[in-house]
Amino acid sequence: MRRAWQRGPGRLSGGRKRTLAAGCVAAGLAVLLAACGPAIGGTSGGSGSVPSGSDGGTTATYALSPGGQPSYPFPFMDDAEAADDSVYNANDFQQLLYRPLYWFGTGLNPYLNTQLSLAKPPVYTGHKVTITLKRNWKWSDGEPVDAADVVFWLNMMKNQGPNGIYFTATGLPDDVTNVRAAKPYVVTMDITTPQFSQTWFTNNELSEITPMPMAWDVTRAGAKAGSGGCHTQVASCGAVYNYLASQAAGQKTSTTFATSPLWSVVDGPWKLQSLSSLGKLVLVFNPKYGGIAQLPAGHITTFIVVPFTTEAAEFDVLQDPTGSNTIDVGYLPTVDAEEPAAGAIVGGNPSSLSDYKLTAVYPWQLSYFPYNFNNTKVGPIFQQLYFREAFQELVDQEGIINGPLHGYGKPTIGPVTSYPVTKYLSPTLARKGDPWTLNIQGAKTLLSQHGWQVTPGGTDTCVRPGTGPSECGAHITAGEKLQFTLQYATGIDWMESASRELESNASLAGISLTLDAEPFNTVTGAAFDPAKPNAWELAEWGSWTYDPDYLPSGDELFEGGAPNNAGDYDSARDNQYIDATLTARTPPEFQKAMYTWEDYLAGQLPVVYEPTTPQLIETINGLDIGPQNSALTITPETWVYRK
């Protein structure tokens, strides 16, 4: 799963708080020069109903949600690149150049898209899986996208093992054997798990694979394609990975990515023309793209991606579509949006954006922020369920939705998002809705009943240490205080507003929160650095998208030891229920196992639930981008200007 926020509000999820007034103020936060505008130089794009540039209307400029930027081209990442595993890199950069084996996003649903996938749906014969690749896909160097490219990826996963960003103890690559290119376009493998869910294996295992070209199977510059041997021998993959990772070292080499003999070999619809050190990305159409027959006449051929440091900066540029910094597709802060009428998905567009059409899409994501259960100081407090219940009662999800989110958003009620509506949500949870509405008195009572001297406006202290039912809990000493630091990512207005409201609510229950606003990569970098377990206590960066594991079965986020389980929540019962979802063979068995797991974990509050919020997409008049799907996979090669 990807660390997301919300792109306007979306892509990295969240919503927005109040857009700060016209100037470059950021409510007590350090103000960077770039906060007054995009984190790039001037860009060109459409204006009015159809762009009038010399390219005849084939360029579109796309604004990211604030806080992150494309920086890492290599789609295979290990723990060292955890901070780069975001939608900024995956959906908005890597997947445009290098297509995953299976593409997800059909209409508004996050389901398998067989048309855009590189392979036909997998065939299961007992424990054998057969994957047949389509023959129309080519790499830009002329080589076919074939079975060896898939084996290359799987061999590297095997070699990297637990270091891989998608590694889980019950998943790829340890749950398969006999991986081989049976024919030039056919890959076979045997699943070693006695019981497994075919649904899970397709949606959360095979979905992680991105075929890699032989041009990448090298250990040094100028080496012959395939000479690294990783596509045939797992033991050879370490040296290949080390070389590729060194060549993808983020900002240090971003300006040379376009000329690299590695990253210029693509099978997606786009090739890299340039990537600035500030994150401005320019892509040009790949004429050898295998899906070219599916594209509309006159589609865009230059795609510019621009990052912003704040929502206010992006909104300012949106309001000036004829200026030097033009956005063709961007995101409206919810704090600047008109509240939708009852039953409506989207409200009216601000009058200042008359050149744009407003639509709303709820991403397939889960909104929360984690506790650090490994923190030696405060981890024992977080381990107490009564504390997590009390703390959740201080989060006013409805207040956030009706306040800084301007009516946009849905409460998060458990480990599977309740919106968009899918078959994965437990009916029991759907009926109950949000059981953790704002209840400051309830929080105070819970803490008092469990050994804390509650001091509203001050700091609660443990006065009854011990493990009894009315005591503070294991490893919590007498006099220990309820004081924590909440580190949150800058750039998203609603997140700042929600953090400050939580700080205020917590103080009324005697919980002292210190807010620490930091850049997105700083927050995620600290939260995913296993070498520094005490570097953080509470970390808020937005949300997670279900990508590339589109089935919300819990093995990526809530299973003990999973790389994306930032706070390292670990429960034997939770692990047992998750394993049951992975081994349910039939769809009815899988659905039953999913619901059992959700119903249990929802009440355990392994994380702090926050509202899920939509992307409010602004599209320049005349540009047809089609319906955007909740999987957040974008296909700008299909965008076209209509006169």
Image: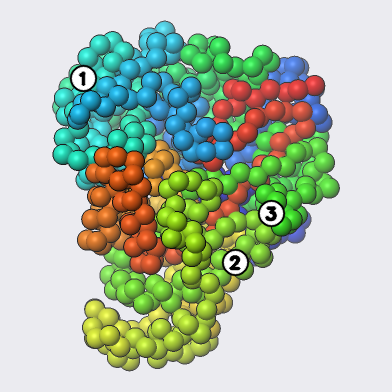
Q: CA distance from mark 2 to mark 3?
A: 16 Å
* Residue situated furthest top in the rendering: 142
Residue 638, horizontal then vertical, whole percent: 61, 23
> Element at badge 1?
strand
Viewer can see residue 191:
yes
Q: Nearer the viewer, residue 420 or 562?
A: 420
Residue at 82% across, 41% down? 354
Q: What amino acid is labelled 3 in the image?
A: Gly
Circles 1 and 2, Cβ within 8 Å, touching? The answer is no
Marks 1 and 3, Cα distance to the nearest angstrom?
Answer: 52 Å
Q: Earlier in the sequence, mark 1 or mark 3?
A: 1
The quadrant of the picture occupied by the N terminus is top left
Residue at 35 percent of width and 22 percent of height = 212
Check disc 3 and report the residue beneath it: 343
Residue pointed to by mark 2: 398
Is disc 3 surrounded by few (<14), some (14 to 19) or many (20+) residues within 10 Å?
Answer: few
Q: Is residue 332 above or below residue 112?
A: below
Secondary structure type for disc 3: loop
Where in the figure is residue 239, as x and y percent of width and height?
Answer: 22, 27
Q: Residue 208: which disc?
A: none
Residue 572: x and y in percent read 22, 61
Locate the C terminus by quadrant: top right
| Label of residue 180 in the image | 1
| Place of residue 340 in the rendered image (x, y in percent of width and height, measured from the top left) | 72, 54
Quadrant hosting residue 492 = bottom right
> Can you say whether 387 is above or below 179 in the image?
below
Are discs 2 and 3 less than 8 Å apart at CB? no
User: Residue 169 vs residue 222: left or right?
Assistant: left
Residue drawn where x is 38% and y is 76% of the image: 387
Badge 2: how crowded within 10 Å, few (<14), some, or many (20+)?
A: some
